[in-house]
Image (spheres, rainbow, N blue to C red):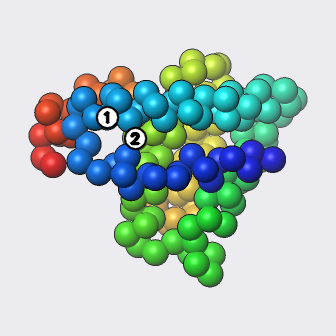
Amino acid sequence: MFDHTASMFEGFRARLKKLKKKTYEERFGSFFDENRACFEDMLQYVKGREDIETAAAEVANIFAENVFAEYATGGKLPGGLKVDLSLYMIYFIFPSILKLSDPNSAILCDAIRDEWRARTDNPDMSYTTYEELHGAFQEKLFGLF
């Protein structure tokens, strides 16, 4: 189930490279268009279950399992890869789920965030919307890069 979640990460390094406001707009737009159906399937699964929290946790577990199966070695992600994948989720995965404006979007994001926090030992990871991220760009993200 949701086997195509790992394919969302194909080319993730290229999407993160040299992010500026305009390139983020373009890359996010293409990412969202390519993966919208998968995010809708996830939300439909959550919506179709009686216990929404449990369903969201199941989706989050499957999502993380698929990503770890693709990128982890011995069940662990190397430090730099862990950071890159986490950033990719913050810039692309979470904003895409929230962009769908489904009543269960935040519940699903919370479940994925919590699962990712536990698997990567990163209790501070969080997420935000596309609009908030996009607004944080000057020419470059936060004017730093």
Residue for point 45% across, 65% down: 82
- Depth order, front residue of 25/91: 25
Type of residue at label 2? Answer: Tyr
User: How far across and how far down the image is residue 86, in percent?
Assistant: 44, 54
The percent coordinates of residue 79 (x first, y second) are: 41, 72
Q: Residue at x 65, y 47 (%)?
A: 5
Q: Which residue is mark 2?
A: 91
Lateral position of residue 41 relative to residue 116, left or right: right
Disc 1 to disc 2: CB gap under 8 Å: yes
**Mark 2 residue element:** helix
For residue 66, what is the image quadrant?
bottom right
Which residue does the image show at 17% across and 39% down from the upper left?
140
- Secondary structure at badge 1 equals helix
The residue lying toward the viewer, choosing from 111 and 23, is 23
CA separation, marks 1 and 2?
Answer: 9 Å
Residue flagged by tag 1: what amino acid is it? Tyr
Q: Can you tell which mark lies on residue 24?
A: 1
Query: Please, is residue 73 above or below residue 16 in the view?
Result: below
Q: Is residue 75 visible?
A: yes
